[in-house]
Image: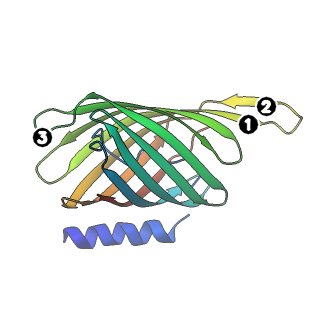
C-alpha cells in the first residue's frame, strides 16, 4: 500500500505542470564529511502553473556543514547552490534545526535563506521550513526591482533503505509574489 501511494504521487507529479524556484527537498540532517547525495525532484507550481524537473547534488564538507547544488529544467533553466549549517543535529532523540544560505539564477539572480526544522520518527521524518528568497528582477525599463517571495514548506522523507529515500513536499506561498506548489522525488546517498 505504501509503495502504491508513493508511485501514485510520483505519476501525478511527473504528469503535472512549477515555477523556477527549488523547494527545500530535505530534512535538517547534514551529510557526513565526504559523503554525497544525488536526487531527482519533479515539481509542480500553481498560479502560474509550471513544471520543473530538478536535479540535486550534495556533499558533506564538515560534521555540521554541507553544500548542495540544484539544476532545474523547465520553462527556464534554474541553477542554484547553498550551504547548510546544522544548528541542532537531527537525531533519533531530538528534532534537528538547520540554516541554509545560497544563491540561484534563472531569468533573474536571487539569494536564498531557509530555516528548517525536522524530526525523525520510526518510519519517516517530518520537516517544516521558512524559505525566503530575494529576487532581483529586471523591470523592463532598464532598471530592476526587488521581490521577496516567502514560503512555508512542509514535507515528509520516507527512507526506503539506508541509501535511498522518497521525499514529498508542499509549499504554501506567504507573500503575494510567491507561488504555492507540490513536489516529490527520490534521493540517493553515497
Side of 17 relative to 116 (left or right): right
User: Dot 3, crowdedness within 10 Å: few (<14), some or many (≥20)?
Assistant: few
Distance of label 2 from label 1 (alpha carbons):
5 Å
Name the residue furthest top. 87
From this view, report whether residue 39 is shown above or below residue 142: below
Q: Position of residue 182 (x, y in %)?
A: 45, 54
Mark 3 or mark 1, earlier in chain: 3
Count of numbered marks: 3
Whether residue 84 can be seen here: yes
Side of 121 relative to 32 (left or right): left
Which residue does the numbered mark 2 point to in the structure image?
Answer: 144
Q: Position of residue 131 (x, y in %)?
A: 46, 35
Distance of label 3 from label 1 (alpha carbons):
42 Å
Observer-nearest of 122 and 90 = 90
User: Dot 1, crowdedness within 10 Å: few (<14), some or many (≥20)?
Assistant: some
Which residue does the numbered mark 1 point to in the structure image?
Answer: 137
Q: Marks 3 and 1: which is nearer the front? A: 3
Q: What residue sits 42% from the left and 44% below the top?
A: 24
Kindly check if marks 2 and 1 are in contact, taking CB atoms under 8 A apart as contact: yes
Q: Quadrant of the N terminus?
A: bottom left
Q: Would you identify the image quadrant in which residue 64 lies?
A: top left
Observer-nearest of 159 and 38 = 38
Circle 1: element type: strand
Name the residue furthest front. 34
Q: Which mark is residue 92?
A: 3
Mark 2 or mark 1, earlier in chain: 1
Q: What residue sits 26% from the left and 38% below the top?
A: 118
Q: Position of residue 48 (x, y in %)?
A: 63, 53
From this view, report whether residue 115 is shown above or below residue 160: above
Mark 3 or mark 2, earlier in chain: 3
Q: Would you identify the image quadrant in which residue 98 lies?
A: top left
Amino acid at each position: 500500500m505504501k509503495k502504491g501511494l508513493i508511485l501514485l504521487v510520483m505519476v501525478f507529479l511527473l504528469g503535472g505542470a512549477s515555477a523556477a524556484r527549488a523547494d527545500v527537498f530535505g530534512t535538517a540532517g547534514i551529510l557526513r564529511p565526504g559523503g554525497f547525495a544525488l536526487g531527482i525532484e519533479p515539481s509542480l507550481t500553481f498560479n502560474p502553473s509550471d513544471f520543473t524537473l530538478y536535479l540535486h547534488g550534495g556533499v558533506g564538507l564538515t560534521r555540521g556543514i554541507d553544500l548542495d547544488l540544484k539544476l532545474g529544467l523547465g520553462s527556464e533553466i534554474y541553477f542554484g547552490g547553498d550551504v547548510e549549517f546544522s544548528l541542532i543535529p537531527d537525531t533519533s532523540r531530538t528534532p534537528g534545526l538547520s540554516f541554509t544560505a545560497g544563491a540561484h539564477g534563472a531569468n533573474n539572480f536571487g539569494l536564498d535563506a531557509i530555516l528548517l526544522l525536522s524530526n525523525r520518527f520510526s518510519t519517516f521524518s517530518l520537516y517544516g521550513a521558512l524559505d525566503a528568497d530575494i529576487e532581483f528582477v529586471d523591470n523592463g525599463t532598464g532598471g530592476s526591482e526587488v521581490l521577496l517571495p516567502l514560503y512555508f514548506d512542509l514535507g515528509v522523507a520516507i527512507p526506503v533503505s539506508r541509501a535511498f529515500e522518497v521525499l514529498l513536499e508542499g509549499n504554501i506561498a506567504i507573500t503575494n509574489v510567491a507561488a504555492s506548489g507540490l513536489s516529490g522525488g527520490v534521493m540517493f546517498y553515497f
